[in-house]
Image (tube, helix red, strand yellow):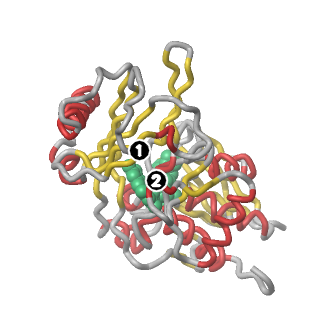
Amino acid sequence: MRTSLAIIGAGLAGLTAGQRLIRRGFHVDIFDKGRGPGGRMSTRRETLAGQNLHFDHGAQYFTVRDRRFAAQVKTWEAQGLVAPWPEAGPQAYTGTPMMCSPLVDMAQATGVRFGVRIDGMVRDAHGWHLVSDAGSFGPYDAAIVAIPAEQASELLRWPAPEMAAVAARQISQPCWTTLVALPAPMPGHPPVTRAQGPVLAWIAHNATKPGRADDNSWVLQSTPGWAQANLALDRETAARMMIAAWRETNGGDLPEPAFSRGHLWRYARSAGSGEGYLWSDSRQVGVCGDWLIGPRVEAAWLSGFRLADAMAPLRTGT
Ligand SMILES: Cc1cc2nc3c(=O)[nH]c(=O)nc-3n(C[C@H](O)[C@H](O)[C@H](O)COP(=O)(O)OP(=O)(O)OC[C@H]3O[C@@H](n4cnc5c(N)ncnc54)[C@H](O)[C@@H]3O)c2cc1C
């Protein structure tokens, strides 16, 4: 009989583990509280005066160091799901036509249940049961938790206290993000600015990424320090302050935006515990996510990849 597995979290780590374990014969159910794929690599769609706008909402690009991840990126590139984005640096890649494109593809292949927030996990003689607003799921032979450290420490507190303790030692940095549509192009403005001020760390013209529509969509990201000091702001105020900071860095030259929206990523950049992944053979529960390696897209992928291999090593090939 096939091993049944529940994965909580359909970010890149959870989807990578899920896809790999499906290929090895597991029956996998993946749950995510979000409305659609992406996690911290999500892309937000907005309609403005009949025009569809897309904003990469979290991670803007990623780099590649590990040879296994490099092979994956090559495959995604051949499928048209990622492409180099030289404006962000010589080694920078981004999803195409959206940052979340590789995850959309993986979510379709694995069949994620979106809009389901898992609030509890219980193991009994039959296996793992998940508790959510939408009812309970299970039993499953095994379970993987693939969510940010602070949320994992809560979920794992009772079913796996030693794993919860590893997660509880992590402190992620927040990031305020503001999506902006300008009424007109900004000739002469660089496509990417790594800002130096106390408020903004990043200003990017989303449409300069490969495969995007030629529109006036921009993404601003705050510094971690400014976000930490301003966690309690409402999103309109945060957006207004970030746009004012942008105008200031641009010598006052910035038209009134046609659209703007602020969003607080409370756990934007993980710390990186160094464990890679966590797995308990006796209880058949595992943990993956960027925070077990470092605050990067590649780390999320590697953590999911390594956990899947620890659970079901391949005898030959990859
Ligand atoms: C603003 C920002 C900028 C970034 N910039 C970069 C960058 O330039 N380069 C780079 O490499 N990386 C960057 N990153 C980091 C990168 O996005 C992450 O490292 C990576 O996406 C993490 O993937 P993950 O699968 O570990 O976690 P996530 O993407 O967070 O996935 C976790 C998933 O779990 C779901 N979830 C959480 N709790 C529950 C629950 N109880 N029940 C069900 N589902 C749940 C969430 O909805 C989410 O989809 C950035 C991140 C942010 C936010």
Image vertical order of residue 264 relative to residue 180, above or below: below
Residue lying farthest bottom? 315
Residue placed most toward the observer, 81 or 284: 81
Residue placed most toward the observer, 200 or 147: 200
Could you tell whether 88 is left or right of 100 in the image?
Answer: left
Q: Can residue 121 be seen in this view?
A: no
In which quadrant of the rendered image does the C terminus lie?
Answer: bottom right
Disc tally is 2
In the rendered structure, find residue 191 and report the number of the disc placed on it: 1
Percent across and percent down for residue 197 are 17, 49
The image quarter containing residue 182 is top left
Image vertical order of residue 14 relative to residue 118, above or below: below
Image vertical order of residue 285 relative to residue 191, above or below: below
Give the residue number, with chain letter if any, for mark 2. 87
Q: Residue at x 37, y 74 (%)?
A: 273
Percent across and percent down for residue 286 are 55, 70
In which quadrant of the rendered image does the N terminus lie?
Answer: bottom right
Mark 1 belongs to which amino acid? Pro
- Marks 1 and 2 sit apart, C-alpha to C-alpha, by 7 Å
Q: Which residue is drawn at 28% across and 57% down?
A: 173
In the rendered structure, find residue 4 and report the number of the disc placed on it: none
Percent across and percent down for residue 293 are 44, 73
Image vertical order of residue 222 relative to residue 254, above or below: below
